[in-house]
Image: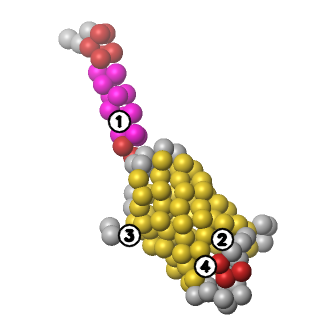
Amino acid sequence: MFKMSQMFVGSAVCALALMIAVAASQAADGTTTWKGSYAYVDGRPAVRFTLTLTTKGKTISGRVVEPATFGDGSSDNLIANITGTSFGYSVSFVKTYDGTGGQSHSVNYRGTIDGETMYGFWQIGEQDVGAWYATQSGK
């Protein structure tokens, strides 16, 4: 027959296992490379990118390199820096072009991290919006 103390210990063990599982699902600190693309809702072709992402706790930062599909034509690639946060399955960051190719605007990204994939939506101001997707390189 179970006693109340045995039920309490069993409940505590289950709660601890759940906390460990949630902690393990968090992105580990370090640097990873992601390959992906973003698309426009107006039908323009999708743009491929490479993202080098550094995670430290809930903070993420990194660098994006993509072909220069817009800009002043002075560079083959556009380069942007990102800063943001990641918690659980949610990711949110701002991509700011560094001036390469004449571009220095920012793009807001929101999405979901599901293991080795990320996906979501991007937005510039009120009008330009689209979807994005990335997979961890080498996986």
Q: Locate residue 51, reporting x and y percent.
A: 49, 68
Q: Which residue is mark 1?
A: 20
Q: CA distance from mark 3 to mark 1?
A: 26 Å
Q: Which residue is mark 3?
A: 137
Q: CA distance from mark 1 to mark 2?
A: 39 Å
Residue positioned 60% across, 65% down in the render = 81
Q: Amino acid at mark 4?
A: Leu
Q: CA distance from mark 4 to mark 1?
A: 40 Å
Q: Amino acid at mark 1?
A: Ile
User: Element under label 4?
Assistant: strand
User: Element under label 1?
Assistant: helix
* Mark before the other along the chain sequence, 2 or 3: 2
Q: Which residue is mark 4?
A: 78
Q: Mark 4 Cα within 10 Å, few/some/many (few <14, many 20+)?
A: many
**Quadrant where the C terminus lies?**
bottom left
Of all residues shown, which one is farthest toward the right? 126
Q: Is residue 13 above or below residue 54?
A: above
Residue 3 or residue 100, whichever sits in front: 100
